[in-house]
């Protein structure tokens, strides 16, 4: 059985390598992270960028994960600078909620538990 895959849309999101993407489970949101030290959020209905989260990490952002619970979307970004940034949206504004430090090496993966905790 052969399955044909068709490219629907290509999003020119970053200036350099994209390390990770995550689609929100309930909302039409896509988050991408890159070696350009940014996290970008796109509206999947319009394919337009709606936010750029930057100026937090000193090195590449390697992973991104949406919080699976809560009324407002939140996400976590893990970086090669050994930190995790946690972002939340209140209305249309994105805010840095926390920077988690203490890892000895790069953070290559982030994930939330199904009840919304790390």
Image (tube, grey):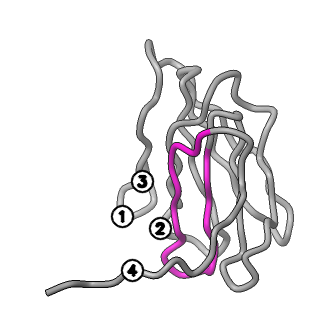
Residue range corresponding to the magenta coloring: 17-33
Identify the secondary structure beneath mark 4: loop
Magenta stretch, main secondary structure, is strand
Q: Position of residue 97 (x, y in %)?
A: 71, 45
Residue at x 59%, y 35% (from the top left corner): 61
**10 Å neighbourhood of mark 2: few (<14), some, or many (≥20)?**
some
Residue at x-position 46% and y-position 81%: 6
Query: What is the distance, in whole Å, between disc 1 and disc 4 at their CAs?
Result: 31 Å
Mark 2: which secondary structure? Answer: loop
Left/right of residue 91 with respect to residue 107 in the rendered view:
right
Please give the residue where the numbered disc 2 appears in the rendered image: 68
**Residue wearing tag 3:** 112
Tell me which numbered mark, 2 or 3, is placed earlier along the sequence: 2
Residue 6 sits above or below residue 18 on the image: below
* Callout 3 touching callout 4 (CB < 8 Å): no
Q: For label 3, count other residues whose C-alpha is less than 10 Å away and answer few (under 14), some (14-19) or many (20+).
A: some
């Amino acid at each position: 059985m052969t399955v044909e895959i068709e490219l629907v849309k290509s999003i020119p999101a970053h200036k350099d390598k994209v390390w990770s993407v995550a689609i929100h489970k309930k909302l039409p949101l896509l988050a991408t992270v890159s070696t350009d030290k940014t996290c970008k959020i796109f509206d999947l209905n319009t394919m337009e960028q709606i936010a750029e989260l930057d100026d937090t990490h000193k090195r590449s952002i390697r992973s991104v994960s949406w919080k699976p619970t809560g009324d407002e979307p939140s996400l976590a970004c893990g970086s090669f600078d050994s930190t995790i940034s946690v972002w939340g949206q209140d209305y249309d504004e994105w805010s840095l909620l926390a920077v988690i430090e203490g890892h000895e090496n790069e953070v290559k993966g982030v994930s939330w538990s199904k009840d919304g905790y790390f």
